[in-house]
Amino acid sequence: MKIVGVTSCPSGVAHTYMAAEALQKAGKDKGIEVHIETQGASGADDTLTKDQISAADFVVLTNDTSIRGTDRFKGKKVVQMSATKIIEKADALMNKLEKMA
Amino acid sequence: MENVASFVNIVTAFDIDANSKEEAIEQVINKLSESGKLVDREKFQKDVFGREAELPTYIGYGFGLPHSQSDFVKKATIGIGKLRRPVVWTEDKEADFIFLIAVPHGGKENMHLKILANLARLLMHEDFREKLRSLPEKGVRELLRDSQNLS
């Protein structure tokens, strides 16, 4: 299974990156390929490539603040969650997505 | 080589005696203020509490992560607070460790944001959290300084 995602949060200083790390860590633990773009106070990092997006089974987006460039995910299965929830429950989310895949 | 540690200052308060989240955060802010990291202590505190009211910054594992990118910050600083006993952070969640992030506004220089982003990522790792909890005050400051150099 492959997952891409974009994380962001109101101040863009902390939760953006913790949510990204939580998803990447949970993916690594389960052998799932995960690519996360962060849209934080210092701009976007690790911008997703077209290939990464087209290969992904699911797209995970935070919904605390609006994400730029969501038109890139047209036609994909998108899951939206708060950054806080992702930080707390990234493992559970990966399990759920694995079952849905 | 540039001295990376100068981008983000570390301030610690390791014996916080507080009965509420607000009291605990105030004591960490006092430390920042005493060491000259703030432009205006009261206004910065208002920004931090404002962010906290918007969405509590509990991140799990007994950690609270209050933060603000504020006009009233002089230099990017992390204030680490260790509490004598846990305080209620939000609903049924208690925290006994505070990681207060203070970031100034403006400027094209965003190295401090990159460093803070990296530290936020580190907090998601159990071994890093365990080190923060087990090390003495000086050790924690060194750990954070070393972590900045890795980013």
Image: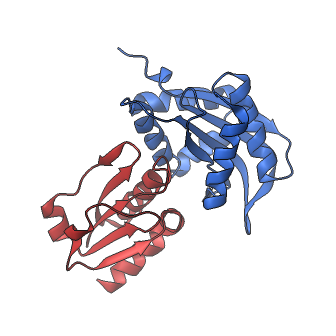
- Judging from the image, what is the letter of the chain drawn in red? A
Position in image of residue B32 (x %, y %): 68, 29
- Residue B134 visible in rendering: no
Q: Quadrant of residue B75?
A: top right
Position in image of residue A49 (x %, y %): 17, 58
B113, B43: nearer the viewer: B43
B21, B96: nearer the viewer: B21
Colour chosen for chain B: blue
Q: Residue, x 55% and y 51% (percent of image)?
A: B126
Query: Is A19 on the left or on the right of B52, as rendered?
Result: left
Q: Residue, x 54% and y 46% (percent of image)?
A: B127
Q: Quadrant of the N terminus of chain B?
A: top left
Q: Residue, x 79% and y 55% (percent of image)?
A: B87
B39, A12: nearer the viewer: B39
Position in image of residue A46 (x %, y %): 27, 50
Q: How was this image coloured? A: by chain
Q: Is residue B15 above or below residue A44?
A: above
The number of discs equals: 0
Residue found farthest to the left: A51
Q: Quadrant of residue B31?
A: top right
- Residue B1 visible in rendering: yes
Q: Is residue B100 above or below residue B31?
A: below
Query: Is B137 on the left or on the right of A36, as rendered?
Result: right
Residue found farthest to the top: B1
Position in image of residue B63 (x %, y %): 65, 52
Q: Residue, x 64% and y 45% (percent of image)?
A: B47
Q: Is residue B76 above or below residue A7?
A: above
